[in-house]
Amino acid sequence: QVQLVESGGGSVQAGGSLRLSCAASGYTYSSNCMGWFRQAPGKEREGVAVIYTGGGIKVYADSVKGRFTISRDNAKNTVYLQMNSLKPEDTAIYYCAAETVPTNRGWAACSASYGKGDFGYWGQGTQVTVSS
């Protein structure tokens, strides 16, 4: 089992920054695909960013490219989402998620999981509110 706990959310003005953290505990060694998702009121959950640690591949949603950065600190079992130049439309609950994909499929499997939002472990979410 893997437990994920997000932190770092809050309220900021447009143009501000926040750094979300996702601390993983439990059997974390094999979680090689980590993602951040968000869900705004009245909207479906959407993928924000994903990192495949097997090859260091990172992919971002078009809406956050150039503003958000996903990273992972293996020593701390923590995944981060640095969010800069925040906009009101970034307001949402942010969730981190973890999955173990077969290494023989690697990024293809991680990408597929991210595209479908099909991860085995999810955090409880942290609220991000951006005011104009």
Image (cartoon, rainbow, N blue to C red):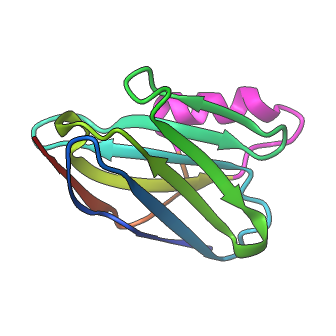
> Does residue 31 appear in the picture of this structure?
yes
From the viewer's perspective, tell me whether residue 49 is left or right of residue 132. right
Name the image quarter holding residue 64: top left
Outermost residue, right side? 104
From the viewer's perspective, tell me whether residue 130 is left or right of residue 113. left
Provide residue 44's location: percent of width, then percent of height.
24, 34
Outermost residue, front side? 15
**Span highlighted in magenta in the image:** 100-118
- Is 56 drawn above or below residue 93 in the view shown? above
> Foreground: 96 or 26?
96
Provide residue 80's location: percent of width, then percent of height.
55, 57
> Foreground: 52 or 120?
52
Provide residue 93's location: percent of width, then percent of height.
26, 53
The reply to whether the magenta stretch includes residue 111 is yes
Numbered label tally: 0
Provide residue 14's location: percent of width, then percent of height.
21, 42
Outermost residue, bottom side? 26
> Does residue 2 appear in the picture of this structure?
no
From the viewer's perspective, tell me whether residue 131 is left or right of residue 61. left
> Residue at 47% of width from left, 56% of height from top?
96
The reply to whether the magenta stretch includes residue 68 is no
- Give the position of the C terminus as an image quadrant: top left
> Residue at 75% of width from left, 31% of height from top?
107
- Give the position of the N terminus as an image quadrant: bottom right
> Foreground: 65 or 93?
65
Name the image quarter holding residue 63: top left
> Residue at 17% of width from left, 38% of height from top?
88
- Is 31 drawn above or below residue 56 in the view shown? below
